[in-house]
Amino acid sequence: MAVIYKRVALIGLGLIASSMALAMRAGGLAGEITGHAKSAETRDVALEIGLCDRVFATAAEAVEGADLVVLAVPVGAMGALAREIGPHLAPGATVTDVGSVKQAVIDAVAPHLPPGVAFVPGHPLAGTEYSGPRSGFATLFRNRWCLLTPTESSPPDAVARLRALWEAMGSNVDEMDAAHHDLVLAVVSHTPHLIAYTMVGVADHLAQVSNSEVIKYSASGFRDFTRIAASDPTMWRDVFLTNRDATLDVLGRFTEELFALQRAIRLGDGDHLHAYFTRTRAIRRGIIEAGQDTAAPDFGRGADAKGPAAARAG
Ligand code: NAP
């Protein structure tokens, strides 16, 4: 494949950025990859395992001369980094991000970007519960959606070029506005994470089923909750702080449905429960038919939980 960007600067070198670096290298999509992360340790690892050609102690240095800058840090860190890199961006460069929330990122980043620099926010719906520069793999984005949420001032040619990059890394790309993105993600990712965190927290509080029994018998649903609840605390703290309204809206609906099911159980209303579970089963079938998961009993997880089978939306 042909080079799409001559120099890509990755700001943040964790799961998403390292997967992008490996996917870009595998496809020959970037001429050069520069990088910056907060800690010297992460920067050293990124050089050692070949994610970046050069790493820099500051984000400002890393973006010099880049035609694509990717903000791949927790959502709450993006505004300060945008302020730092703004004066150092090359005219004609595109800035994008991979944050799990979009409106808050646009509000925090856009004011710091100079005229002549394109901003095209994005979010790959792919991830695992692992973090850091060693957690990435080149196929993370394959057959996963990447949502771009261009603003009114995103130039169409910059959007098209970024779309081409994500497609070349294996993603399917859709465009939508940021507010819609944040509501959709509150339903499909953010609220489910909160429920998983809660369920694991509840089990932890129930002393009589905790520790050995939770681990010993967690072959079914609970094991998947624990996997989700092992996700990076900083990332998820920022997701809930910045997608507050949509998450609270969906949580409100969730609570109503939960009360309805609770009531059905108390009243012995089997018809209600059966009808509800029939409807939810159809949703699961739809996800499998859309190729977004496998019907295998172990969810295709296999031995290597780091691999593509573990991939999920973040
Ligand atoms: P990660 O593996 O935890 O890595 C985060 C990276 O950001 C690390 O390299 C960290 O550096 C760096 N960083 C944090 N604060 C920084 C700062 N102030 N200045 C410079 N570097 C900083 O995170 P990730 O999973 O790749 O997530 C990155 C972004 O992608 C987040 O916005 C997240 O919402 C989004 N996202 C995540 C997933 C997922 O499932 N994980 C999926 C889709 C989108 P150090 O290592 O030196 O601390």
Image (cartoon, rainbow, N blue to C red):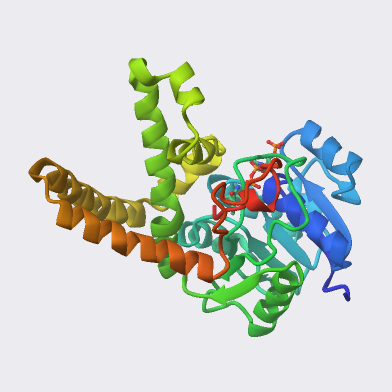
**Figure check: 181 above or below 158:** above
**Residue lying farthest left?**
267
Looking at the image, which residue is at 63% across and 73% down?
172
Looking at the image, which residue is at 52% across and 56% down?
108
Q: Give whichever of 171, 238 is nearer the camera.
A: 171
Q: Percent from the top left, x then y, of residue 84?
A: 67, 50
> Exactly how many numbered labels are in the figure?
0
Left or right of 13 in this view: 99: left
Q: Percent from the top left, x then y, of residue 16?
A: 68, 51
Looking at the image, which residue is at 68% across and 61% down?
141
Q: Quadrant of residue 163?
A: bottom right
Left or right of 28 in this view: 293: left
Q: Percent from the top left, x then y, of residue 175?
A: 54, 76
**Figure check: 44 above or below 81:** above
Q: Give whichever of 83, 76 is nearer the camera.
A: 76
Q: Give whichever of 103, 216 is nearer the camera.
A: 216
Q: In which quarter of the image is residue 214?
A: top left
Looking at the image, which residue is at 53% across and 71% down?
290
Q: In which quarter of the image is ligand 1?
A: top right
**Residue lying farthest bottom?**
156
Q: Give whichever of 64, 72 is nearer the camera.
A: 72
